[in-house]
Image: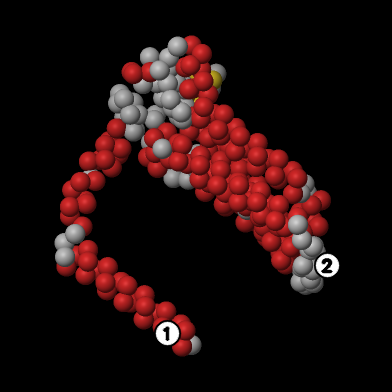
């Protein structure tokens, strides 16, 4: 073991020991637990309950909290990632590329490797979309689906090179446009109920999902009746998950292309 790794291991052990002593030996966990437990208990019992004033009409507690009960925070987190990508694009545009031969793979892969990569990339894309679309019903959501999706272009980049991604439509301007559109529509969706309430005279608020008694029962519907049955989309949750998927998948793919273009250079 290298000396630096040994010191890091010792530091981690010491930190674990210190936190164990503070939280368990000094018994400082219980006061915080007693004070905070009513809040998670409220969310766990009230959000899935359609009769509750706090319901999101969704069995997925985490997604409901992220988009319905703290939607403004979630939007700012998405906006921060967007600003970071735009800032990176601007900074990189000020300098020259750091290498030549961009888009060439390190080695020529066999037909089998290329075929398997195509199939795996398709499977990953389908799974990612499924995670995003079902995020209001099962664990997952737009962010998780977007992170999973970016593995597909990463594999294509490694096996085929960046030129293949460009030919498939993965270009910086297109990705930035989709990213901008996704973030903008998230903000519009979050503000739509508030704006509608202001125009119609209802008491509404930002990122409101379901109707509330104190908002004159004004909000998003939670299901859509179709000829073959009902589609439960939990109001704004499914819409926001789809838009978040677009924003995150295109944002991370754009970042991947930037890393390859400006830092990966060479053969």
Mark 2: secondary structure:
loop
| For residue 175, side relative to residue 63 (left or right) | right
> 143 or 148, which lies in front?
143
Disc 1 residue crowd, few under 14, some 14–19, many 20+, Cα 10 Å: few
Residue at image position (56%, 34%) is 186
| For residue 239, side relative to residue 97 (left or right) | left
Residue at image position (26%, 40%) is 39
Residue 256, labelled with which disc? none
Estimate the x, y position of residue 127 in percent, counting from the top left.
57, 48
> 19 or 105, which lies in front?
19
Q: Which residue of the protein is positioned furthest toward the front in this rendering? A: 94
- Sequence-earlier tag: 1 or 2: 1
In the rendered view, tell whether residue 249 sits above or below residue 227.
below
Residue at image position (44%, 45%) is 139
Residue 101, labelled with which disc? 2
| For residue 116, side relative to residue 78 (left or right) | right
In the rendered view, tell whether residue 247 sits above or below residue 214.
below
Is there any visible trace of residue 244 in the rendered image? yes
Residue at image position (81%, 57%) is 163
In the rendered view, tell whether residue 256 sits above or below residue 174.
below
Disc 2 residue crowd, few under 14, some 14–19, many 20+, Cα 10 Å: few
| For residue 64, side relative to residue 23 (left or right) | right
Residue 6, labelled with which disc? 1
> 222 or 215, which lies in front?
215
Q: Are marks 1 and 2 in contact (CB under 8 Å)?
A: no
Whole-number angstrom distance, CA of label 1 to CA of label 2: 40 Å
Is there any visible trace of residue 149 in the rendered image? no
User: What is the quadrant of the C terminus in the image?
Assistant: bottom right
């Amino acid at each position: 073991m290298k000396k630096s790794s040994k010191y890091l291991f010792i530091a981690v052990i010491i930190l674990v020991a210190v936190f164990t002593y503070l939280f368990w030996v000094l018994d400082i966990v219980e006061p915080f637990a007693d004070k905070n437990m009513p809040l998670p208990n409220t969310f766990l019992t009230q959000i899935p309950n359609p009769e509750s004033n706090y319901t999101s009409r969704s069995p997925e507690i985490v997604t409901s909290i992220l988009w319905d009960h703290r939607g403004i925070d979630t939007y700012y987190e998405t906006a921060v990632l967007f600003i970071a990508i735009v800032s990176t694009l601007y900074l990189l545009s000020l300098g020259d590329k750091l290498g030549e031969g961009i888009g060439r793979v390190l080695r020529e892969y066999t037909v089998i490797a290329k075929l398997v990569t195509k199939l795996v990339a398709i499977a990953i894309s389908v799974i990612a979309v499924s995670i995003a679309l079902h995020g209001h019903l099962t664990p997952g959501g737009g962010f998780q689906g977007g992170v999973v999706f970016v593995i597909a272009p990463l594999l294509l980049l490694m096996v085929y090179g960046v030129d293949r991604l460009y030919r498939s439509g993965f270009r910086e301007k297109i990705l930035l446009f989709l990213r901008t559109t996704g973030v903008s529509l998230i903000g519009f969706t979050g503000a739509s109920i508030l704006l509608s309430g202001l125009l119609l005279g209802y008491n509404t608020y930002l990122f409101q999902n379901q109707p509330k008694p104190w908002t004159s029962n004004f909000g998003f519907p939670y299901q859509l009746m179709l000829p073959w049955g009902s589609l439960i989309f939990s109001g704004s949750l499914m819409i926001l998950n789809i838009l978040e998927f677009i924003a995150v998948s295109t944002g991370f793919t754009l970042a991947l292309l930037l890393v390859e273009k400006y830092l990966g250079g060479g053969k």
